[in-house]
């Protein structure tokens, strides 16, 4: 896209942002030399500075513009014969003052086609969404909005830089309720999704949510979001009373050993373990996770758990605990439902059985844990600060991070397994997961 843009608009001020810019930083100039600037972290405030710099360059030209007193502090100089900027975004003080997404720009493309209608008809979550989510219900018309930014936790596999890092910030419930009401009335929606990193961090906000949503008349509108499983306590009841019917949980693992390695153990394991029998064997599940599922069922919220296999240190026995928890969910949700009924089939299908393959993303704790393996498998080298050199080897690795379920192949074409199970076990387990035969993993 950068090549196409510069071909038609060679003098434009070309900027990129998002997770890639935040993680890779100035190395992105090596891979996309057409860029004039990158915008890191949040962009709401710094976009005004970017626009002002672009105007200065347009007014004076590049040579005079970058030397003028009007240019911002984010100018980094001439880099590979091109003037470059690196913008560091920050959090606006009041998220309620940020404009809504300009959906109206999608109401007609240059040929008069309504792209927004196509987008609205694609479900946010569910089997048809093809995004590792499953639901027992459907949605015909849905849109998303974000109610909070950042996450105060530090899971080892996660990079939060593009959405505020550990700096957690929230919009007011009143502002959110007004937006829901406006969206539903304007676009005739039957579902609203909040793809926040962590919707329920603030107990105070969640305690008020039912009252506020009722006041604005949106408590009967279906919506869903993401939280941690240790937050599905009394907060789940308040959320359900406000119309919540779906919570996506980043469970990742149900095993004590793996959760500890993932840096998720502190909150998930604080209530101890609960023994549960699956297929004649006893597994120790985190009580917090069991309670989260039970609480959701009691209030009519569908819980969707996502999972990661082959995290560093995970052996086959640890993976089996996660598989057993998935099977327990299927049994728990099907209690009292006739096995041959449509309701039973829907219940079974609505329990997510997919798993991501543990993959090292730049900037994460996991990356540092498997740093030497990355060097061995992909010839990734590092500078004096310990950061990866943005050469062709690192570029090729990043290009492979397009599908979190697939198995990465190294420079020789061999599969890469960051976990502690044997390669044969890893590949067999991955095959069972991909073929929706996870129960066979318990027989390995």
Image: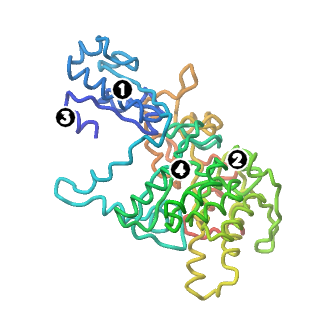
List x then y, in percent, for residue 221.
Answer: 49, 66
Q: Is residue 227 left or right of residue 78?
A: right
Q: Which callout, 3 or 4, points to the residue nearer the camera? A: 4
User: Which labelled disc corresponds to residue 196?
Assistant: 4
Alpha carbons under labels 2 and 3: distance apart: 47 Å
Is residue 440 in view from this perspective?
no
Report the residue at 30% width, 59% height from top. Answer: 116
Dot label at residue 7: 3
Look at 65% across and 56% down and name the residue there: 251
Residues tagged 1 and 2 counted as in contact (Cβ below 8 A) = no
Which quadrant of the figure contains the N terminus?
Answer: top left
Which circle marks residue 49 in the picture?
1
Residue 209 shows in the view: yes
Q: CA distance from mark 3 to mark 4?
A: 37 Å
From the viewer's perspective, tell me whether residue 373 is left or right of residue 130. right
Query: Between disc 3 and disc 4, whose residue precedes?
Result: 3
Q: CA distance from mark 3 to mark 1?
A: 25 Å
Q: Earlier in the sequence, mark 4 or mark 1?
A: 1
Count neighbours of disc 4 (C-alpha within 10 A) and say few if under 14, some if 14 to 19, many if 20 or more.
some
């Amino acid at each position: 896209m950068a090549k196409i843009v510069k071909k038609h608009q060679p003098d434009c001020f070309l900027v990129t942002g998002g997770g890639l810019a935040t993680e890779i930083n100035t190395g992105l100039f090596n891979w996309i030399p057409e860029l004039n600037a990158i915008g890191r972290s949040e962009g709401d405030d710094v976009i005004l500075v970017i626009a002002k710099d672009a105007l200065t360059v347009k007014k004076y030209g590049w040579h005079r513009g970058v030397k003028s007193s009007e240019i911002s502090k984010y100018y980094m100089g001439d880099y590979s014969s091109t003037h470059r900027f690196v913008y560091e975004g920050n959090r606006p003080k009041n998220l309620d003052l940020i404009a809504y997404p300009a959906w109206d720009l999608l109401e007609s493309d240059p040929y008069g086609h309504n792209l927004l209608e196509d987008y609205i008809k694609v479900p946010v979550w569910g089997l048809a969404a093809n995004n590792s989510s499953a639901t027992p219900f459907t949605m015909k018309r849905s849109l998303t909005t974000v109610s909070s930014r950042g996450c105060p936790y530090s899971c080892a596999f996660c990079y939060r830089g593009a959405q505020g890092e550990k700096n957690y910030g929230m919009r007011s419930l009143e502002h959110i309720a007004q937006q829901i009401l406006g969206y539903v009335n304007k676009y005739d929606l039957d579902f609203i999704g909040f793809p926040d990193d962590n919707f329920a961090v603030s107990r105070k906000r969640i305690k008020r949510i039912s009252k506020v949503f009722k006041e604005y008349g949106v408590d009967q509108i279906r919506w869903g979001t993401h939280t941690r499983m240790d937050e599905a306590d009394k907060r789940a009841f308040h959320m359900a009373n406000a119309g919540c019917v779906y919570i996506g949980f980043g469970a990742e693992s149900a095993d004590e050993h793996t959760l500890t390695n993932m840096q998720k153990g502190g909150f998930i394991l604080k209530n101890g373990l609960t023994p549960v029998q699956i297929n004649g064997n006893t597994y120790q599940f985190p009580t917090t996770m069991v309670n989260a599922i039970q609480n959701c069922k009691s209030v009519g919220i569908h819980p969707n758990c996502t999972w990661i296999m082959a995290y560093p240190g995970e052996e086959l026995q640890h993976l089996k605990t996660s598989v057993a928890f998935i099977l327990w969910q299927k049994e728990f949700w099907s209690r009292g439902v006739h096995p041959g009924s449509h309701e039973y089939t829907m219940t079974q299908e609505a329990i997510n059985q997919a798993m991501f393959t543990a993959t090292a993303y730049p900037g994460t704790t996991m990356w540092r844990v498997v740093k030497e393996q990355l060097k061995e498998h992909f010839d990734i080298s590092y500078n004096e600060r310990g950061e990866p050199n943005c050469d062709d080897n690192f570029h090729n690795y990043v290009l492979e991070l397009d599908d979190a379920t697939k198995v990465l192949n190294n420079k020789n074409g061999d599969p890469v397994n960051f976990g502690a199970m044997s390669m044969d076990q890893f590949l067999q387990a991955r095959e069972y997961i991909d073929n929706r035969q996870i129960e066979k993993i318990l027989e390995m």
